[in-house]
Amino acid sequence: MADVILKGIKKSYGSVEVIKGVDIDIKDGEFVVFVGPSGCGKSTVLRMIAGLEDITDGTLEIGGKIVNEVPASKRGIAMVFQSYAIFPHMTVRENMAFGLTIAGASKAEKDEKVAEAARILKMEHLLDRRPSQLSGGQRQRVAIGRAIVRKPEVFLFDEPLSNLDAALRLDMRIEIGKLHKSLGATMVYVTHDQVEAMTLADKIVVLKDGYVQQMGAPMDLYHRPENLFVAGFIGAPSMNFLDVEVIGKEGDTAKVRSDLVAEFAAPAWREDIPTSGRAILGVRPQDLRPVDSNGLLSGHVTLAERLGIETVVDVALKDGTRVICSLAEDRVFEPGQPIHLDFDHKRAHLFAPERGGHQAAA
Amino acid sequence: MASKLTRSDRAGWLMALPGAGLIATFIILPFFLAFAFSLTNQRLASPNPTEYVGFENYRDLLGLSIFTLEPERNEAGDVLVDDDGQIEYPRLRKFTRNNPDYPKLQGKREWFSWQSGENRTVVLASDVVFMKALVNTITFVLVVAPVQAGLALVLALLINQKLRGISLFRAVYFMPVVVSIVVVSILWQFIYSPGDGLLNNVLSGLTFGAFQPRDWLGETSTALGAIIAMSVWQGVGFHMVIWLSGLQTISPTLYEAAEIEGSSKWQVFRYVTWPGLRNTAILILIVITMQAFALFAQIDVMTQGGPLDSTQVLVFQAVERGYGKQDISGGSTISVILFVIVLCISLLQRWLTRERN
Ligand SMILES: Nc1ncnc2c1ncn2[C@@H]1O[C@H](COP(=O)(O)OP(=O)(O)OP(=O)(O)O)[C@@H](O)[C@H]1O
Ligand SMILES: [Mg+2]
């Protein structure tokens, strides 16, 4: 049984602090996904959990024990790398049994455990091949197999699917999801891919600049992002942001308007929203819908991308501000065509203005 | 990108021409010339016309015979013994000089011999100096190849760490490589010089004077060893750099994977580093072997093959004969023999280190 608890974890390289105090609580058997922009420190946190990087400050607990000083091999973890990290001169079987070889296990034990892992991953027929004779997806399966053979309490994945093509990624994603259900182990997974994060995670941790921005179930993050960054980061295409003026706040709703947005009452549950003055309105592209007249927004179409299942419309408002609208249908728009957009007021998001403007965050 | 120039055959050949021409003139042509000369009695400068002599040069170099000498006996058949109690044998010259009964021994000289009962078995060679050179060269290669490669690997492993000032060590280890071997040889002559040389001084200092100074290059028992030690030192930096480049091609995540699995230092080397260095190892072994066979400058500067031919080697012999004795055909023959040896060894090494599946 292994919870993983990070308390005030910091990491510095020389004088550069990359992780600036991270608290994450991972329950036994939970599937936690770290997301965030490139360079935000996802891999660094994962590697600290693995024991591949020293922890500069804070405590890391795995299974109730503080493991800051415990070597990687004694932490009960297994890691799957983006670059697979399988040994090119060994067969698949030898690769999967590597940990057992190191531990000096008997041949019978190796054969048994490798056979079991191969059965789980449906790769019995590949066992005697060499890595050079495998496809990328098969190689990653070997790496996962090697992790399974270790019977770890915690699996760590660092962008395991990002070297694979889209179709294979889908397969492997489903496979990893199944694996989590069947093994019931704790899994920590780093990815760039939103879909992977949304579909696999019990809990998503959004990281940026060495801080946790928000942590929660995927739908919590989607529907109730706590700040502009999370709102912009989760969901594709990303949320539209518009500057607005708060002209009155009452309980959890605020009246807002601007030159571009007609006055309406927006939900304002976030604590730091001012009672008057500047604020930022966020609307998801999927929540916008074209109307014949009287929409809250109006402008003209600059580009429409028809993807069959959806149509992504790029709209320029009066002053040129871009807004993206994503319709779950195939519809034809002509560039230059005037368009009115409306949305469900309750689905709008209101954020306090951030220093430096929201563009930087989005 | 596929312009007319890159597709034209003629342009391609034209561009390859300067390089190919140089290789042909200075490597391929001399090689065939050497082979041709080795079948003649060509001399560097001679009034007599060159004649084709077939494989006589090879016979003159490689000829070997084994001959058993029986002791001298008196009328009664007893073995004659000299004043010191040594068995007396007939003189070898009786058999090797114009003795029609022993045409095979004609002109050969004793290389080495051993005692078997009353008899003495003698190995005779047409060219004893060549044989000594051959044995010395092979000894040199057999010692230098593993020692130099191993030492270079150890240095590379030590240097392939992220430590403060590590590049200083890299530079220091590599320095002997960029110094000309001739200069290195002269410097090492000071180190090895008899009596008051550096090595003698250091050794007697370390042993508080118990060590008796020796003439490292002047004694048959130490001369070749001294040359080997110095050659290893000189070349080790170069091979260290090759190992280092091999080490750096190994993906760091492989080491991390091994670390997570709990590998000890030795297991990391055994399962990650060494397999990753396979191709580098083959390269280094072949390069060192070839370089070692080509041993010349050290000998030329330090010992001239002496003392008592204890440091004679093939290339030195080839040069000595070709230019020193003006015997171009003899020198060429040695070159061709050397070529064949190196070729065979390289092929053997490739075969032994081939990819097995
Ligand atoms: N060895 C190192 N020395 C100095 N800085 C480092 C080192 N490793 C990582 N960093 C820095 O730490 C920060 C976080 O790196 P990290 O690899 O964790 O990012 P990431 O979130 O995994 O990014 P990506 O999505 O591109 O993989 C980066 O700014 C990076 O430059
Ligand atoms: Mg990363």
Image: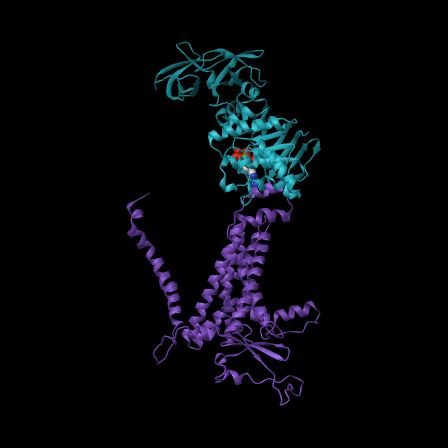
Chain colours: A cyan, B purple
* A57 or A235: nearer the viewer: A235
Whether residue B323 is visible, yes or no, is yes
Q: Is residue A229 left or right of residue A49?
A: left
* A94 or A329: nearer the viewer: A94
Q: What is the x, y in percent for residue B294?
A: 48, 66
Whether residue B312 is visible, yes or no, is no
Q: Quadrant of the N terminus of chain B?
A: top left
Relative to A20, residue B68 above or below: below
Question: Looking at the image, how many numbered discs can be counted on the residues?
Answer: 0
Q: What is the x, y in percent for residue B124?
A: 53, 77
In which quarter of the view is residue A17 placed? Answer: top right
Relative to A157, residue B335 above or below: below
Name the residue at the bottom extreme. B75
In which quarter of the view is residue A321 placed? Answer: top left
* B352 or A36: nearer the viewer: B352
Q: What is the x, y in percent for residue B305?
A: 52, 74
Q: What is the x, y in percent for residue A194?
A: 51, 26
In which quarter of the view is residue A110 placed? Answer: top right
Name the residue at the front extreme. B76
Relative to A269, residue B68 above or below: below
* A341 or A120: nearer the viewer: A120
Ligand 1 quadrant in view: top right
The structure residue drawn at horizontal position 51% and vertical position 50%, both measured from the top left corner, is B355
